[in-house]
Structure formats: C-alpha cells, structure tokens
Amino acid sequence: MEINKEKNKTTIEFSNNELLVLFDWLVDFNKRDYNFNCQVAEQRLLWDLEALLEKQIVEAFDDNYRKLLDKARKKIANHEI
C-alpha cells in the first residue's frame, strides 16, 4: 500500500490482495448495524467506496471468491502482499 499527496488530492495504491480484503470487509461493514457511529457523510463515503471497488474487483463475482479471499488474507497476514 502506498499513499501520494499532491495539493488537494490524495491517491492510495493497493495491491490486488489488499483491495480484495478491503472490499470484503467494506461490504460486510456496510451490511451490518454496528456502523451506528457513522454520520450521513461518512456512510455515503463508505457506500461510494464500496461501489467503486465493486467495479474494479472481478474476483468478487468468481465462483472461487472465498478461496481467493482466503489466499489474499494469508498473504497479507504473512507480509507477502
């Protein structure tokens, strides 16, 4: 993961594994009621981010999604990003 800040714009780069794990967590978070601390603006950002990621992550629609996600989690946990 890398971050770049220029003037009024910040770019964060993720590996495919990082993106897959983040996307899965975000989908789960947005479905649950435990995000009670979120204000409307924060919730909108989380929904928008989920929608953007969904367009980029073809693995989310793969029959082997769970296996791919488990593999990505293991690689991240072992610093093999």
Image (cartoon, grey):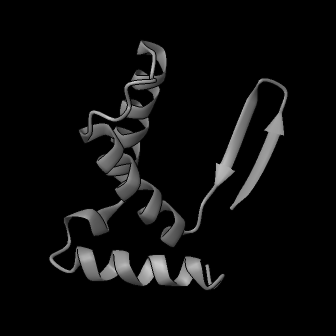
Position of 64 compared to 16: left or right? left
Position of 44 compared to 77: left or right? left
Residue found at the far left of this picture = 63
x, y percent for residue 78:
61, 85
Q: In the displayed structure, would residue 54 be above or below residue 16?
A: above
State which quarter of the image contains the C terminus: bottom right
Residue found at the far top of this picture = 40
The one nearer the camera, 37 or 44, is 37
x, y percent for residue 77:
57, 79
State which quarter of the image contains the N terminus: bottom right
Residue at image point 43% right, 33% down: 46
Residue at image point 53% right, 65% down: 18
Position of 62 compared to 20: left or right? left
Q: In the displayed structure, would residue 65 be above or below residue 54?
A: below
Q: In the displayed structure, would residue 47 be above or below residue 25?
A: above
Residue at image point 46% right, 56% down: 22
Residue at image point 37% right, 25% down: 36
Q: In the displayed structure, would residue 4 be above or below residue 2?
A: above
x, y percent for residue 26:
39, 47
x, y percent for residue 61:
20, 64
Q: Quadrant of residue 48?
A: top left
